[in-house]
C-alpha cells in the first residue's frame, strides 16, 4: 500500500489553508506529505505545488487526497488531465467532501465515465479541426496548410557539387544542415 499524499489550495494570499490542512491530516495524511499553495486555480500555470506533486510527489500505489475537486482542478479539462496523469502513474484519488474514491469499484467507474467524456470531447475537437483544415485546403493557394515554401535551392547544391565542393563545405556556405545537402543531392542527381 502506498502513501496518502495531500493537496490543498486556496485562491488568494489572504485565505487560510488551516481548514484543509486539518481535514487532510485527520484523514491520515502525514504533514510531510502535504502539498499546499496559495494560487488561483483558473490555470495550471503558477501552481508549483501541484506540478511538483504530479511530477515527482506521487508514485504507483499512492492515494492523492484533497478536500474538494475544485481545490484540485478548476475546469473539466484540467480535471481530465490530472485524472489521466494519476491513472498513468497508478495513483488513486480520494476527495473528502465528495463521494469520490478511485480505490473502490464505484470510484473507478466514476473515473472511467469521466475519462470517456474526456475522450469524446477530444475526438469531437479533432473532428472539427480536421474539417477546418480540409475546408482550408479546398480553398487552394490561400490555405495556411499548404506548407512552407522551400528555402533551399537544389540547383545551388547541384552547381556547388559539380564544382567539386564537399557536402560539408556546401552546408557551411549555404548555412544549412549537412543532412539537407545529402537529401537534396539525391533529388538533383
Image (spheres, grey):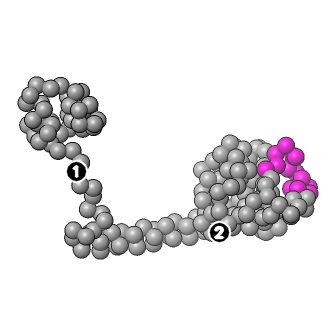
Q: Which mark is residue 75?
A: 2
Image: 60 above or below 173: below
Q: Secondary structure at mark 1?
A: loop
Real-space CA distance between mark 2 and mark 1, rounded to the nearest whole angstrom: 42 Å
Q: Magenta: predominant secondary structure element?
A: helix
Write the residue at 87% across / 46% down. Answer: 30
- Classify residue 72 by image quadrant: bottom right
Q: Quadrant of the N terminus?
A: top right
Q: Is residue 125 visible?
A: yes
Q: Is residue 23 visible?
A: no
What percent of the width, then of the height, locates residue 83? 64, 58
What percent of the width, then of the height, locates residue 116? 55, 67
Write the residue at 21% across / 44% down. Answer: 152
Q: Is residue 33 magenta?
A: yes
Dot in front, 2 or 1: 1
Q: Which mark is residue 19?
A: none
Q: Which residue is mark 1?
A: 150
| Label 2 neighbour load within 10 Å: few <14, some 14-19, many 20+ | some
The outermost residue toward the front is 173
What percent of the width, then of the height, locates residue 168? 24, 27
| Label 1 neighbour load within 10 Å: few <14, some 14-19, many 20+ | few
Amino acid at each position: 500500500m502506498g502513501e496518502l499524499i495531500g493537496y490543498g489550495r486556496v485562491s488568494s494570499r489572504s485565505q487560510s489553508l488551516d481548514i484543509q490542512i486539518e481535514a487532510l491530516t485527520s484523514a491520515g495524511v502525514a504533514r510531510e506529505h502535504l502539498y499546499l499553495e496559495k494560487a488561483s486555480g483558473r490555470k495550471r500555470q503558477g501552481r508549483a505545488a501541484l506540478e511538483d506533486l504530479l511530477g515527482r510527489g506521487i508514485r504507483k500505489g499512492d492515494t492523492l487526497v484533497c478536500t474538494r475537486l475544485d481545490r484540485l482542478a478548476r475546469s473539466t479539462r484540467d480535471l481530465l488531465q490530472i485524472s489521466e496523469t494519476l491513472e498513468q502513474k497508478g495513483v488513486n484519488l480520494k476527495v473528502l467532501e465528495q463521494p469520490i474514491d478511485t480505490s473502490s469499484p464505484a470510484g473507478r467507474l466514476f473515473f472511467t465515465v469521466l475519462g470517456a467524456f474526456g475522450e469524446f470531447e477530444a475526438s469531437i475537437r479533432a473532428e472539427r479541426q480536421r474539417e477546418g483544415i480540409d475546408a482550408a485546403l479546398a480553398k487552394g493557394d490561400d490555405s495556411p496548410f499548404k506548407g512552407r515554401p522551400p528555402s533551399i535551392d537544389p540547383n545551388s547544391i547541384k552547381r556547388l557539387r559539380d564544382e567539386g565542393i564537399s557536402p560539408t563545405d556546401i552546408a557551411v556556405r549555404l548555412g544549412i544542415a549537412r543532412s539537407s545537402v545529402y537529401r537534396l543531392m539525391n533529388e538533383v542527381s
